[in-house]
Image (cartoon, rainbow, N blue to C red):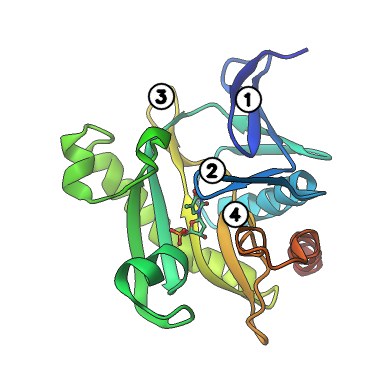
């Protein structure tokens, strides 16, 4: 049995025989609102591992360095070991979720340009919204690192909008995490899945993401399966 390095709400990270390589296991467990709501989404681990693998491969081919190495079906992937920067980057194309509440923008309103936000990855503080000065003052990342992270996030947004458009999906918003390798390179890390992206059907605007779980809308499993089906179809 491999040593468990870390267990999060949706994933377990294991050490492997190689110091630079980790095995990431995607769980069916789902939480929302900072763990206040808990449940299981059948088949989520399988869907998220496969959807993430497709998205990471697509980004790698477009020149974005990621932690992804190899899919280990059904629910695992091998990744390059990184130290995760404690700054979550959210990119928004259409207003939804917390920006709608915080700024009073009706959900579904197109934003005039992609809006980038930073959140402090800290469970005790409930991941508060922070700005560039907060990041520097708290020493969460250097200015050079954040310049690189922000540029990568904007590039990734353009690429993922195209990736999901091929699947008939609108990329409403998403959350990214970045990590630093032992030799100081910055890689896109974490996952790209209906847990971390809002995805709406391009025609009907039906929600095909974790909001179905957060908001008790039903059809949760089916939404994850549908996103995977479309991603696999687009990949050919
Ligand atoms: P928000 O509207 O709740 O701030 O969420 C923005 C995006 O970030 C949305 O696609 C869901 C994703 N997200 C996560 O991946 N993890 C989280 O803990 C939260 C709050 C949001």
Q: Secondary structure at mark 4?
A: helix
The residue lying toward the viewer, choosing from 146 and 211, is: 211
The residue indicated by pointer 2 is 66
Alpha carbon of mark 4 to alpha carbon of mark 3: how far? 22 Å
**Where in the figure is residue 117, as x and y percent of width and height?**
33, 57
**Where in the figure is residue 17, as x and y percent of width and height?**
68, 13
The residue indicated by pointer 3 is 183
What quarter of the picture does the C terminus occupy?
Answer: bottom right
The residue indicated by pointer 4 is 61
The residue lying toward the viewer, choosing from 119 and 125, is: 125
Which disc is residue 161 wearing?
none
Question: Which comes before the other along the chain, label 1 or label 2?
Answer: 1
The residue indicated by pointer 1 is 22
Residue 178, quarter of picture: top left
Mark 2 and mark 4 residues within 8 Å of each other at the beta carbon: no
**Crowd tier of the residue under label 4, counting other residues whose Cα lies within 10 Å: few below 14, some 14–19, many 20 or above:** few
Residue at the (39%, 61%) spot, across then down: 154
Q: Is residue 143 visible?
A: no
**Crowd tier of the residue under label 2, counting other residues whose Cα lies within 10 Å: few below 14, some 14–19, many 20 or above:** some
Q: Secondary structure at mark 1?
A: strand
Q: Nearer the viewer, mark 4 or mark 1?
A: 1
């Amino acid at each position: 049995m491999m040593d468990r390095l870390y267990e999060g709400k949706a994933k377990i990270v294991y050490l492997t025989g190689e110091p630079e390589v980790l095995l990431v296991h995607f769980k069916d467990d789902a939480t929302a609102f900072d763990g206040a709501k808990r449940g299981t989404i059948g088949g989520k681990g399988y869907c998220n591992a496969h959807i993430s693998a497709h998205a990471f491969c697509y980004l790698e081919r477009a020149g974005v360095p990621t932690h992804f190495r190899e899919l280990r079906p059904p629910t695992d992937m091998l990744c390059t070991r990184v130290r995760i920067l404690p700054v979550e980057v959210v990119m928004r194309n259409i207003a939804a979720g917390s920006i709608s509440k915080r700024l009073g923008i009706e959900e579904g309103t197109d934003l005039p340009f992609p809006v980038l936000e930073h959140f402090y990855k800290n469970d005790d503080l409930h991941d508060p919204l922070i700005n560039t000065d907060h990041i520097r003052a708290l020493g969460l990342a250097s200015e050079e690192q954040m310049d690189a992270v922000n540029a990568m996030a904007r590039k990734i947004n353009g690429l993922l909008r195209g990736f999901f458009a091929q699947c008939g999906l609108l990329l409403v918003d998403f959350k990214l995490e970045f990590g630093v390798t032992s030799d100081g390179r910055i890689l896109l890390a974490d996952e790209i899945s209906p847990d971390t992206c809002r995805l709406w059907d391009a025609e009907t605007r039906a929600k095909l993401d974790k909001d179905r779980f957060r908001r008790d809308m039903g059809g949760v499993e089916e939404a994850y399966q549908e996103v995977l089906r479309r991603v696999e179809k687009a990949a050919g």
